[in-house]
């Protein structure tokens, strides 16, 4: 299975999933949930202790079916300063942040999903098994990679929610998986290296094992 997430700008993103590839996966809900879980865990691991990871974890910990619907139809809004502070406190995440910087550099917009039109300026490429994530367009120093990593996870969540917008059970599982990924980061439970075992544990918890 292969995934590519291409950003043509900070306001446009295209997502493609190939279930065939060298190691085919069945094109079903379990494969999609597995892919999202592995991808989110890997990005959390890559982001490390950065504030972007903390914010993403707090947001995902509160994801619900309604969040998926709002992201899908373009009505989702990031929380304001007070709302974000409350969410971080509620989840036990203690971090002093400048909301204006987050707003300007992270929350300015949710990238619009567009049709694939070739490689993007910034791209995340995934192949599995085994899970391998590579990037293109960020340069040696990985300039702005945190911004795009943050939005790539949300974009994949949105893409899958749209893909099965009429399947309430899937949307519920997708939101629950996002919650568990966020909470796993907050609890310091995401290991370095192979994230597949934890992904399988999360899927089993929500009753969506492959």
Image (cartoon, rainbow, N blue to C red):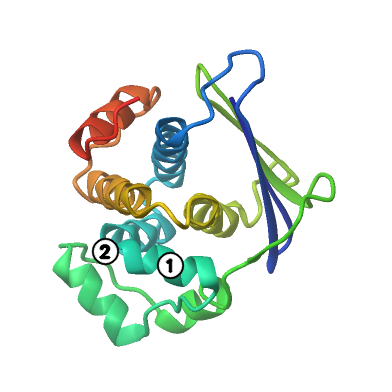
Tell me how many marks there are: 2
Q: Residue furthest top?
A: 22
Q: Position of residue 11 (x, y in %)?
A: 69, 69
The answer to whether 200 appears left or right of 17 in the picture is left
- In the picture, the disc for residue 159 is none
Q: Position of residue 106 (x, y in %)?
A: 53, 70
- Return the residue at label 1: 69
Q: Position of residue 20 (x, y in %)?
A: 64, 21
What residue is at 22 percent from the left and 42 percent from the top?
Answer: 188
The answer to whether marks 1 and 2 mark residues whose Cβ atoms lie closer than 8 Å is no
Query: In which quadrant of the rendered view does residue 110 lie?
Result: bottom right
Q: Position of residue 200 (x, y in %)?
A: 30, 27
The answer to whether 39 appears left or right of 82 in the picture is right
Q: Nearer the viewer, mark 1 or mark 2?
A: 1
What residue is at 33 percent from the left and 56 percent from the top?
Answer: 57
Q: Quadrant of the N terminus?
A: top right
**Earlier-in-chain disc, 1 versus 2:** 2
- Return the residue at label 2: 62
User: Could you tell me which secondary element the residue under label 1 belongs to?
Assistant: helix
Task: Compute the Cα span from label 1 to label 2.
Answer: 14 Å
């Amino acid at each position: 299975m292969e995934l590519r997430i291409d950003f043509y700008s900070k306001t446009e993103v295209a997502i493609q999933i190939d279930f065939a590839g060298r190691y085919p996966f069945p094109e079903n809900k379990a494969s999609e949930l597995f892919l999202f879980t592995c991808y989110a865990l890997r990005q959390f691991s890559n982001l490390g202790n950065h504030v972007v990871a903390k914010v993403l974890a707090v947001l995902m910990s509160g994801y619900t079916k309604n969040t998926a619907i709002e992201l899908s139809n373009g009505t989702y809004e990031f929380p304001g300063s007070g709302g974000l502070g409350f969410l971080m406190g509620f989840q036990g995440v203690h971090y002093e942040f400048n909301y204006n910087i987050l707003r300007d550099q992270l929350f300015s917009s949710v990238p619009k999903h567009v049709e694939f039109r070739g490689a993007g300026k910034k791209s995340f490429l995934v192949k599995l098994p085994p899970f391998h994530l590579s990037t293109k367009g960020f340069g040696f120093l990985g300039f702005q990679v945190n911004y795009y990593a943050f939005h790539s996870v949300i974009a994949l969540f949105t893409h899958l929610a749209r893909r099965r917008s009429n399947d309430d059970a899937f949307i519920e599982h997708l939101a629950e998986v996002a919650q568990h990924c966020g909470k796993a980061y907050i609890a310091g439970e995401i290991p370095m290296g192979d994230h597949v075992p934890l992904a399988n544990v999360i899927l089993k918890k929500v009753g969506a094992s492959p």
